[in-house]
Amino acid sequence: MTLGDYPYLFSCFGARILLMDGNQEIAIEEIEAVMNASGFSLCLVIITMVLGLLAIRLFLTVVKRLLLVSSLDNALIRFVTTSIRVLLVVTLVLYSMSLLEIPLTSMIAVLSAAGVAIGLAIQDSIANVANGLIMIGTRPFKVGDYVRIGDDEGTIEELRLMNTVLSTVDNKKLILPNKTVFTSRIENFNTNPIRRIDLVFTVDYDTDLSMALDVTRKACMSVPAVLAKPAPRVEFYEAAASSLNISAWCWCATSEYWNAYFGIQRAVYDAYMEHKIQIPYDQLMVSMRNAKRPAAKRAAKATAGQEERK
Amino acid sequence: MTDRLLLYIREFWRFAGDRIVNWLVLILFLLVLVIATRGYSNTLSSTMRKIRRLLPRLNALAKRRDGKVRHKDIRRAYSSSLMIQRLINAYTYDHRFDIKTRDAQSSVNSAVKMLESFMLAKDVKAGSGRTVVRNVAKLMENALEQLK
């Protein structure tokens, strides 16, 4: 820096506001000594850090507000804002270190090596986070859906970055790591608006089959939760060992599944009772061929014995 | 002493004034953006205001004399509920450990799901539209109570 530069009040992004200096005499050596003092650099670093952190905070406030009005999931928003914060703070620290003329090359090399070591150490956690991000993006299910993941079943309570929280039917909380969830078979019972209920009813062999089918069909359709379209399908399924089996396929809204299930069971039972259709127990028919009755056998022996004595 | 201090300040300004002014201009710009987006942060009051606007419409639908709820009415209720859901999700971002907020969010999610299922159903029984609207109104009332 030389004193031959035009004096100016301040410059902003390259534009300089010129100010006519007074007739003040300044020793060049004193100016250079002051300028080279490390105290100036330290002050500059402190001011840079304070102003930089304030700017980062304001920037993240704006980013968060804009992301919240979008349809992005809250967990994803949290991840994005945290990542941006970490990135900006690290950049600010490195910039501040460059102001103190600390060599950055070795620092970046150390950080890279540390990153690799940490990555290897926490690779499972990173896998959970990565799978969590993919699930939040692809949305195989959302909060409120009833799902079966592997052998676990429940309602999705929360989708976190590292794990997924389910609430079971008996009110237990299941916390599954996202890596497990992502690699398991997922059954979502809520994706489609309607579901089919498959039931099998048994009637006695002596029952009039046509009448039984008609009664079953009418009973199914009488349940309010059962949809008229697609219409219920009631057919003769099989002639089993102890009974005639009738299958009933009924459709209902997904949210009404259990109401429809229990309603159909009760309606069909009541209809069978009303029409005196027998619901058989398990039974076994035994037929004996070419065998005399024991009493007749004994009588025949006794007669033969008496005749011999005579 | 004073002259020396003034000299240090002046020379520091010549040394670092550019950078400091750049930061200050950047901060000023971000402050303007923060003030411009302040409307997005009033999610609680916006949520409650929208629920209060939706409830009378739902109650009026549920009491329709002819008992007919048109698909258009359900669609309007659905879009209003989606907006409420978005607002309450934004509010829950900062209040996710508050039980009442989570309860309100759960009620709104259930209401939206109920309307969604009704809109996607291919065949509905007579009178079910009114039932859905009544249930949605109850859920929204519960959400409003939790947020108060």
Image (cartoon, coloured by chain):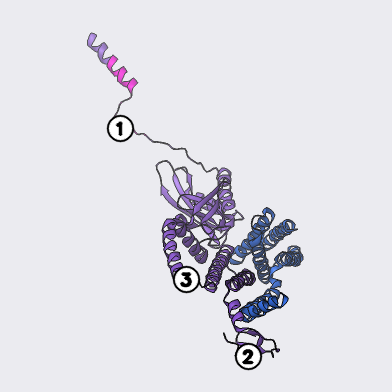
Chain colours: A purple, B blue
Q: Nearer the viewer, mark 3 or mark 2?
A: 2
Tell me where residue A277 appears, x and y as whole percent.
52, 43
- Say which mark, if any, is on residue A104: 3
Specify which label sits upstream in the sequence, 3 or 2: 2
Co-location on one chain, circles 3 and 2: yes
Q: Is residue B11 above or below residue A252?
A: below
> What segment carries the magenta color?
A286-302
Residue occupying the point 63% across, 60% down? B109
Q: Nearer the viewer, residue A42 or B38?
A: A42
Residue located beneath label 1 in the image: A289
Does mark 2 fall on the same chain as mark 1? yes
Task: Mark yes or no: residue A23 visible.
Answer: yes
Q: CA distance from mark 1 to mark 2?
A: 128 Å
Q: Indicate whether residue A294 is drawn in magenta.
A: yes
Residue A126 image position (x, y, % from top left): 46, 59
> Above or below — where is B115 with respect to A204?
below
Q: CA distance from mark 3 to mark 2?
A: 33 Å
Which x, y percent locates residue A295? 34, 20
Which residue is pictured at 67% across the width and 72% down the height? B72
Residue under pointer 2: A6
Q: In this rendering, would B50 be left or right of A176?
A: right
- Name the image quarter holding the N terminus of chain B: bottom right
